[in-house]
C-alpha cells in the first residue's frame, strides 16, 4: 500500500482530525521559509542582523523604521493564493473529518482556502492593531501610504504594528488553549511542513493522545518514531491526492 492509500485509510477512520502545520505548508504557494531572509539592513545600520532579530520586539522598539521596511518588503506577500494542500484541508473540514487547523504561519492562506476553525499561533500579517487604542487595520492600510515609513492610527496617532507574535513576545494564551484542546481531543493528528524544533509551538504535539499520528515533512523530525505514517513528499500534492481518493471503493 502506498502512502496516499495509507493516508486515505487513516482519514476514513477519523472523526476528529487536526492538522498542525508550519512554514512548509506555505512554500508551495511561493512564500519562502522565514529563515531564508538575510541581514539586508547591515549597510544602513552598520551591523549584521539575523531575520530573527529583525522580527523581534527589540528591533521594533530600537530600529522602528527599519522594522517596518523589513516587514513591508519581506513579510507581506502580495498576490499569494492557497495551494492544493490548503484547499484539501478546507474540504476535509467541510466533510466533517477535520475539526481544526493549528498553524505557525501568519499568511492567512488557510482562511482564504475556506477553512473556518484556524488557530494562528503566531498571529496574522493581515491584521495590524494600534498599540495605543487597539483599533485593527487591514494590511492594505500599511501599504497604502509609502511616504509614511511608520504607520500610525487615524484615531490616536499610535503606532500600527503587525498583528503577529514577534520574537521575545509570548503566544496568545487563548489561542494556545484552543490549540491544546483541539489536539488533545483529536483522534488523528497530521503534522505537516514543520521540523518541530521551534518552541513553544513544537511542544503542542505532546498533547496528542489519539490513534493516528501522521508526519508529512521533507526532513526528519523528533516525532518520526512515534508516527504511524511518515511521508517525505510535498504537503500540498500529498493532501490533495489523499482527499481525491477518499470516496474510491466506497
Image (tube, rainbow, N blue to C red):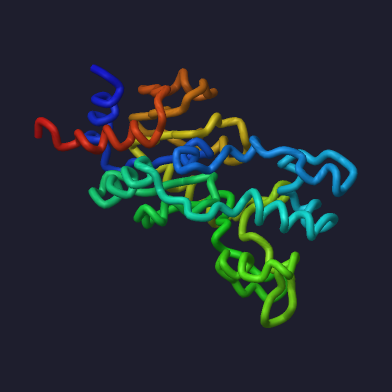
Q: Quadrant of residue 227?
A: top left
Q: Quadrant of the C terminus?
A: top left
> Residue 221 versus residue 237: which sits nearer the camera?
237
Residue beneath the point at 72% across and 81% down = 156
Q: Quadrant of residue 199?
A: top right
Q: Quadrant of the N terminus?
A: top left
223 relative to 85, above or below: above
Residue beneath the point at 62% across and 74% down = 135
User: Which residue is farthest right?
Assistant: 46
Asked whether the viewer can see residue 176, the reply is no
The answer to whether residue 147 is left or right of residue 141 is right
On the image, the x and y values in percent for residue 107 come to: 52, 52
On the image, the x and y values in percent for residue 183 come to: 43, 42
Residue beneath the point at 27% across and 24% down = 6
Asked whether the viewer can see residue 160, the reply is yes
On the image, the x and y values in percent for residue 37 come to: 67, 39
Residue beneath the point at 20% across and 36% down = 246
The answer to whether residue 62 is left or right of residue 234 is right
Q: Quadrant of residue 152?
A: bottom right
The answer to whether residue 91 is left or right of residue 56 is left
On the image, the x and y values in percent for residue 163 come to: 61, 60
> Residue 20 versus residue 79: which sits nearer the camera?
79
Amino acid at each position: 500500500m502506498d502512502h496516499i492509500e495509507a493516508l486515505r485509510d487513516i482519514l476514513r477512520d477519523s472523526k476528529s482530525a487536526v492538522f498542525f502545520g508550519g512554514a512548509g505548508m506555505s512554500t508551495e504557494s511561493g512564500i519562502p521559509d522565514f529563515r531564508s531572509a538575510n541581514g539586508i539592513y547591515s549597510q544602513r545600520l552598520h551591523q549584521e542582523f539575523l531575520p530573527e532579530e529583525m522580527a523581534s520586539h527589540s528591533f521594533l522598539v530600537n530600529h522602528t523604521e527599519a522594522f517596518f521596511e523589513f516587514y513591508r518588503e519581506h513579510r507581506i506577500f502580495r498576490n499569494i493564493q492557497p495551494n492544493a494542500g490548503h484547499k484539501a484541508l478546507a474540504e476535509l473540514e467541510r466533510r466533517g473529518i477535520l475539526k481544526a487547523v493549528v498553524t505557525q504561519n501568519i499568511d492567512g492562506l488557510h482562511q482564504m482556502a475556506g477553512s473556518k476553525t484556524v488557530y494562528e499561533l503566531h498571529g496574522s500579517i493581515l491584521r495590524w492593531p494600534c498599540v495605543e487604542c487597539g483599533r485593527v487595520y487591514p494590511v492594505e492600510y500599511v501599504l497604502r501610504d509609502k511616504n509614511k515609513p511608520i504607520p500610525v492610527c487615524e484615531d490616536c496617532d499610535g503606532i500600527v504594528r503587525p498583528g503577529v507574535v514577534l520574537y521575545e513576545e509570548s503566544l496568545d494564551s487563548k489561542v494556545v488553549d484552543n490549540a491544546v484542546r483541539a489536539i488533545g481531543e483529536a483522534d488523528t493528528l497530521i503534522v505537516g511542513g514543520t521540523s518541530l524544533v521551534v518552541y513553544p509551538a513544537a511542544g503542542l504535539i505532546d498533547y496528542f493522545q489519539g490513534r493516528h499520528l501522521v508526519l508529512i515533512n521533507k526532513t526528519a523530525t523528533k516525532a518520526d518514531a512515534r508516527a504511524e505514517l511518515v511521508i517525505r513528499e510535498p504537503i500540498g500534492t500529498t493532501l490533495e491526492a489523499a482527499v481525491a481518493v477518499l470516496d474510491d471503493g466506497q
